[in-house]
């Protein structure tokens, strides 16, 4: 089994605990037109974690490798002591073209980075994210439909593997143009059962 961490990680975790206390939520400043909601893009995640990581002797490296014929994103969180932890996630593109592949890489980098550093996303609007509050609210905004969690996305990606045709059909069925992350969380069980049935054939 692939080694996912250094022999000792006590110093890394101590530094990460301090850094997480200094991290602010990543601002949701990118639009998801399908669900009429916002999400934190890769730049927003980096903005939230860059300074706390650097102040505590932490760094992140992300690279693309090939494993068993499949492209994977390798994310490593390292500490100045030499200690490290790693995550590996498949990169699944809905279409076999450069644009779709680039979107898949960006999407996976964002979620892997958020997960390994433990950064959350800010649910407030742009005004609140900048430290300003509206004096009055005429009406509470409609709560956007929750999309698949990072763990759910990874589970489905691991199940789908390199079956790009199956992935494309799922994305098309749920109108998800940018990847599984756009699919509503309520559909997870149905999609999972469908993938399991296909695997059993």
Image (cartoon, rainbow, N blue to C red):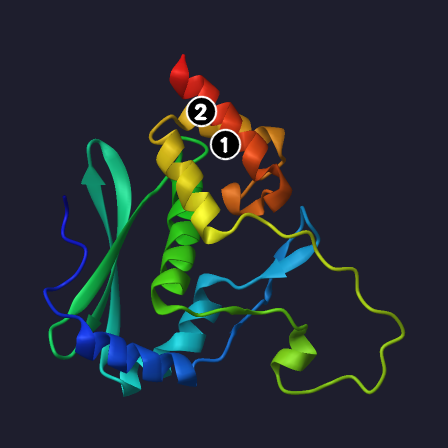
Dot label at residue 192: 1
Point out which mark residue 196 bears: 2
Residue at 52%, 47% (x, y): give it.
181
Q: Residues within 10 Å of mark 2 (few under 14, many from 20)?
A: some
**Quarter where residue 55 is shown:** bottom left
At 63% from the left and 87% from the top, the residue drawn is 131
Label 1 neighbour load within 10 Å: few <14, some 14-19, many 20+: some
Q: Are marks 1 and 2 in contact (CB under 8 Å)?
A: yes
Dividing the picture into quadrants, the one containing residue 200 is top left
Q: Is residue 184 visible?
A: no
Q: Position of residue 61 (x, y in %)?
A: 24, 64
Q: Is residue 57 above or below residue 171?
A: below
Depth check, front residue: 14 or 38: 14
Q: Residue at x 44, y 76 (%)?
A: 48
Q: Is residue 61 left or right of residue 168?
A: left
Measured as percent of width and height from the top left, residue 121 is found at 53, 68
């Amino acid at each position: 089994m692939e080694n996912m961490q250094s022999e000792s990680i006590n110093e890394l975790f101590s530094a990460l605990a301090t850094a997480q206390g200094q991290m602010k939520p990543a601002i949701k400043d990118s639009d998801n037109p399908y669900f009429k909601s916002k999400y934190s893009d890769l730049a927003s995640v980096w903005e939230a974690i860059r300074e706390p990581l650097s102040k505590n002797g932490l760094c992140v490296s992300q690279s693309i490798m090939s494993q068993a014929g499949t492209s994977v994103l390798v994310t490593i969180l390292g500490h100045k002591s030499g200690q490290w932890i790693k995550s590996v996630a498949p990169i699944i593109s809905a279409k076999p073209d450069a644009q779709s592949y680039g979107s898949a890489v960006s999407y996976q980098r964002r979620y892997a980075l958020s997960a390994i550093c433990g950064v959350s996303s800010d649910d407030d609007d742009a005004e609140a994210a900048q430290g300003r509050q509206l004096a009055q609210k005429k009406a509470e905004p409609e709560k956007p439909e929750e999309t698949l969690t990072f763990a759910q996305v990874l589970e489905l990606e691991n199940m789908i593997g390199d079956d790009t045709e199956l992935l494309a059909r799922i994305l098309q069925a749920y109108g998800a143009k940018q990847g599984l992350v756009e699919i509503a969380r309520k559909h997870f069980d149905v999609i999972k059962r469908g993938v399991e049935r296909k695997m059993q054939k």
